[in-house]
């Protein structure tokens, strides 16, 4: 049985869509490849509809949400061997694969540094240094960035929390207050659970920070302060390895900036934590 393409599904459903959904459908069909590199906020802005309307449009087509829709649409235009990483080709030898991966990471780091807002970085560093508690929210690779940052913050005497379970994250966000910091990490900026945690934290008057891609995202619209990182031009930006490299570099810089806010205290914590773990090293 031949599987129907995403574009064919849109055309077949056109008669049953609402006026707003038809507007989205027409924009998608006329700007197919552009849509594939757009996040939900960019599509909604370009189609002149709301983010919620885009989600309803995707569900009307039978998809779980926008990401599920993009995965299906990508199969229409992207060769099978490009789904792991569109930069890599099946015929590349090992040296070429390494050159391309390293080259992409270097370019993304340079791009991220070029767009970095140092004033915003300084503001977030102050938040990290002064918050009563810090909780990182994320999923998948972004959650791992939060865990890595938790480890580095503890070395300089700043305690923070990371919860892997989605329900635990929601519970933690509900217990935050005005002196606490909710640090949300999501390169796509549209992770539903992270968005919900951000909304709950803001409802509790907690301070909020978002680490997202450089484009407009639902998460960055909510946060008190948003830090942006660059990415290579791929359909699935949130899955790119270089995304994690850029996020980690930003977090490393923030930890360093927080440490130098009171370096004497940070130095003391570094010595104490180093001493505590020395017995585990030969």
Image (spheres, rainbow, N blue to C red):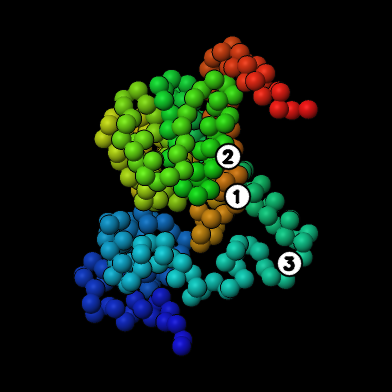
Residue 165: image location, x then y, percent: 43, 45
Real-space Cα distance between discs 1 and 2? Answer: 10 Å
Residue 203: image location, x then y, percent: 26, 35
Label 3 vs 1, first from the N-terminus = 3
Q: Which residue is mark 3?
A: 92
Real-space Cα distance between discs 2 and 3? Answer: 28 Å
**Residue that lies at the very extreme toward the bottom in this rendered image:** 1
Above or below — where is 258 with respect to 74?
above
Q: Residue at x 41, y 23 (%)?
A: 131
Residue 183 lies in quadrant? top left
Q: Residue at x 53, y 48 (%)?
A: 141
Q: Which of 113/224 is in front? A: 224
* Circle 3 crowding by C-alpha within 10 Å: few under 14, some 14–19, many from 20: few
Q: Is residue 258 left or right of residue 41?
A: right
Residue 280: image location, x then y, percent: 71, 27
Q: Residue 248 — which label?
A: 2
Q: Quadrant of the C terminus?
A: top right
**Residue that lies at the very extreme toward the left in this rendered image:** 19
Mark 1 element type: helix
Mark 3 element type: loop
* Circle 1 crowding by C-alpha within 10 Å: few under 14, some 14–19, many from 20: many
Mark 2 element type: helix
Q: Which of 102/135 is in front? A: 135
Q: Which residue is mark 1?
A: 242
Q: Residue 255 — which label?
A: none
Above or below — where is 237 with respect to 195?
below
Residue 166: image location, x then y, percent: 40, 46
Q: Pointer 1 and pointer 2: residues touching (CB < 8 Å)?
A: no
Q: Residue at x 36, y 35 (%)?
A: 172
């Amino acid at each position: 049985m031949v599987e129907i393409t995403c574009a064919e599904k849109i055309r077949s459903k056109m008669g049953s869509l609402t006026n707003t959904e038809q507007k989205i459908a027409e924009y998608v069909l006329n700007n197919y490849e552009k849509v594939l590199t757009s996040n939900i906020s960019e599509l909604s802005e370009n189609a002149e509809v709301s983010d919620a309307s885009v989600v309803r449009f995707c569900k009307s087509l039978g998809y779980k949400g926008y990401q599920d829709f993009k995965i299906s649409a990508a199969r229409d235009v992207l060769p099978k061997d490009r789904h792991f990483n569109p930069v890599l080709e099946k015929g590349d030898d090992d040296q070429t694969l390494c050159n391309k991966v390293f080259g992409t990471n270097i370019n993304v780091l340079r791009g991220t540094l070029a767009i970095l807002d140092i004033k915003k970085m300084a503001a977030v560093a102050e938040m990290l240094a002064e918050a009563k508690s810090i909780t990182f929210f994320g999923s998948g690779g972004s959650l791992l960035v939060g865990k890595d940052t938790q480890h580095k913050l503890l070395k300089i005497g700043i305690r923070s929390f990371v919860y892997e379970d989605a329900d635990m994250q929601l519970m933690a966000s509900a217990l935050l207050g005005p002196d606490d910091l909710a640090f949300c990490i999501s390169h796509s900026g549209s992770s539903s659970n992270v968005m919900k945690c951000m909304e709950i934290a803001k409802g509790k008057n907690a301070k909020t920070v978002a680490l997202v891609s450089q484009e407009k995202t639902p998460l960055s619209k909510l946060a008190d302060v948003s830090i942006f990182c660059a990415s290579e031009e791929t359909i699935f930006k949130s899955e790119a390895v270089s995304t994690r490299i850029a996020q980690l570099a930003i977090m490393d810089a923030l930890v360093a900036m927080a440490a130098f806010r009171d370096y004497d205290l940070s130095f003391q914590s570094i010595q104490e934590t180093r001493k505590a773990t020395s017995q585990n090293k030969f």
